[in-house]
Amino acid sequence: MPGSKTTRREWGTVRHRGTLYYATYRHGTALDNKTRQFVSVIHKAPISFQTEGAARVWLDSERQLIESGTWTSPIERERATKAEAMTLTEYANVWLEQATHLRPTTRNLYERQIRARIAPSALGDTPLPEIARADVGAWWRSLDHTHERTADIAYTVLRTILYGAVDDGLIEANPAQRIKGAGKPSKRRTIDPLTPAQVAAVADAMPPQWRLGVLLGAWCGLRSGEIRELRRKDINTATGVIKIRRGVTRASSEVVIGEPKTRASIRDVRIPASMLPDVRQHLLDFAQIGDEGLLFYEASGGKNVPDNRWRRAWLKACEQVGIEDFHFHDLRKTGLTYLALNGATARELQVIAGHTTATMAMRYQEVADDHLTGVYDRLSNQIGGTR
């Protein structure tokens, strides 16, 4: 190879390439996955050298470690050195930067937890290898537990980051495992579904251009972010179907439009027949023009309605009709409850709501199309009776 020279002596190899020298040696054996035979393992110096002599000194030091029985692989030693020099906060920021799989809203959540609850703590300034389970326990007890759900989220973020440190070989075990009282499932709110009459009342109390959103949340089981990103091209009034392909979320101050939260959330949802006149009238009166026209938008700017403005309008409408402690997302439970009462199966409810099942076999059960038609007909009659 031009510009490359390899020198061998009794032990180890030094390769000269350009102006630098690279050292390798063989030690130990490992199973080759392709040949299924044991082969010798080649270990490389983690750095390059300016001279051949420096490379030889490194090889001699490696041989001394082997002969003394204190040898570990150069890669493991390099990781340990990096870990000793890296605090939890430093690693958390590196981990977050490399976690390209996170959704924008999830990334924003992690950033807030690191900034507010991990970095300011004594744990945040602790080098990774020095973090013990007792330290994590003390950190957990120091959190503000008046909002237990927030504390549990902070713990989950910490545990996930430390699992990343284990995967990166910086620590041997996760010290955030099995901390007493931490990360337990949050208590579910007890919600009584609204009656069809209550749904109609709160919808009428919304701003007229957003009224249909309440009906879609209840009787079609759509999430707020799915509703606020609906466009004309997603609605087929001839077949009575809504295509859910996108959602809008907010990450920090940035509005993000993307796929729904899970693959199961990409779905086609039927519109009860008694709701179709409302949908058609909304398209005539309020929706933007063109296939890409939004069904719901801000009057100033014509962009997606921000979640905080939608929430304020919802809370004001609920107050006006005397409904308390009922979130917009709770409309989904209302609609799904009535679908169940009208005969929808668990699998059908899962498909309608876009939930991801924990049981793989459930994914392959066919939704009975004829049966679901009957379910929607009965729901439509029930809704229509309150109009």
Image (cartoon, helix red, strand yellow):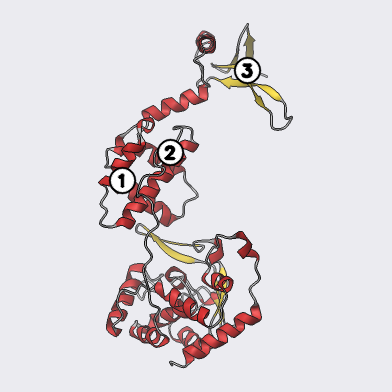
* Screen quadrant of the C terminus: bottom left
Q: Tell me the CA gap for discs 2 and 1.
A: 15 Å
Circle on res. 243: none
The residue most toward the top is 10
Marks 1 and 3 close (CB-CB < 8 Å): no
**Residue 66 shows in the view:** yes
Q: Secondary structure at mark 3?
A: loop
Residue type for callout 2 = Asn
Mark 2 surroundings: few (<14), some (14-19) or many (≥20) residues within 10 A: some
Marks 2 and 1 close (CB-CB < 8 Å): no
Q: Which residue is mark 1?
A: 140
Position in image of residue 337 (x %, y %): 47, 78
Q: Which residue is mark 3?
A: 3
The residue most toward the right is 35
Q: Which residue is mark 2?
A: 174
* Screen quadrant of the N terminus: top right
Locate residue 311 relative to residue 296 in the image: left or right.
left
**Total count of labels:** 3
Mark 3 surroundings: few (<14), some (14-19) or many (≥20) residues within 10 A: few
Q: Nearer the viewer, mark 2 or mark 3?
A: 2
Q: Secondary structure at mark 1?
A: helix
Q: Tell me the CA gap for discs 1 and 3.
A: 57 Å
Position in image of residue 202 (x %, y %): 35, 83
Disc on the earlier residue, 2 or 1: 1
> 55 above or below 319?
above
Q: Quadrant of residue 255?
A: bottom left
Q: Tell me the CA gap for discs 2 and 3.
A: 46 Å
The residue closer to the viewer here, 314 or 69, is 69
Disc on the earlier residue, 2 or 3: 3
